[in-house]
Amino acid sequence: MLRPPHYQMLFWLALVVAAVAVIARAFWLYRASLTWPTADGSITRLDIERRMAAEGGHYFRATFTYDFFDPDGRRLSGTWSKNFSSELEAHNFAARELPLGKPVVVRFHPRNPALNDLELDSWTYTNDRPISLNISE
């Protein structure tokens, strides 16, 4: 017969196994999406909304809408979002990186193009793009 400490250990073991399974599935889906085909699209809309942070205060979420055509010629849309500390920072990022009308590459699921995402470089995610390339001699 199992004593209560064993039940507690089984609970934590089940929790760890479930967490590992979720992480493994997310990684598998990410790897699978790298083989999805791409389509040309463009940024069609920008929405910036103020949101309350869990720890208090607020932040601004910029949501970029993009349109693209699937292989059957159907026009589809998707969104991509990024958080900012100020509305001005969100507008500056949008003007610099993803202005309205900017051509973008969209990666989509081959059997269900409604599952899609922007193909972005790492600078877009981190905002680490150099402002200038002044090289001192």
Image: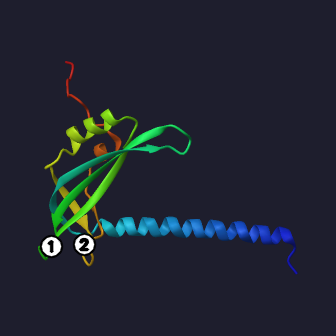
As rendered, which of 65 and 17 lies closer to the eye? Answer: 65
Q: Earlier in the sequence, mark 2 or mark 1?
A: 1
Residue at disc 2, secondary structure: loop
Residue under pointer 2 = 113
Q: Nearer the viewer, mark 2 or mark 1?
A: 1
- Which dot marks residue 25? none
Q: Position of residue 34 (x, y in %)?
A: 30, 65
As rendered, which of 64 and 48 lies closer to the eye? Answer: 48
Indicate whether 133 appears above or below 63. Answer: above
Indicate whether 45 appears above or below 91. Answer: below
The residue type indicated by label 2 comes to Pro
Residue under pointer 1 = 74
Quadrant where the C terminus is found in the figure: top left
Question: What residue is rendered at 56% in x and 66% in y?
Answer: 20
Indicate whether 127 appears above or below 69. Answer: above
As rendered, which of 53 and 130 lies closer to the eye? Answer: 53
Residue at disc 1, secondary structure: loop
How far is the residue under mark 2 from the one under mark 1?
Answer: 10 Å
Residues at marks 2 and 1 touching, judged by CB atoms closer than 8 Å: yes
Question: What residue is rendered at 50% in x and 43% in y?
Answer: 53
Question: What residue is rendered at 32% in x and 34% in y?
Answer: 89
**Residue furthest toward the top?**
137
Q: Position of residue 28 (x, y in %)?
A: 41, 69
Residue 85 placement: quadrant? top left
The residue type indicated by label 1 comes to Arg
Residue 5 placement: quadrant? bottom right
Taking the image as shown, residue 6 lies to the left or right of residue 15, namely: right
How many marks on residues? 2
Q: Position of residue 65 (x, y in %)?
A: 24, 55
**Residue furthest toward the left?**
73
Quadrant where the N terminus is found in the figure: bottom right
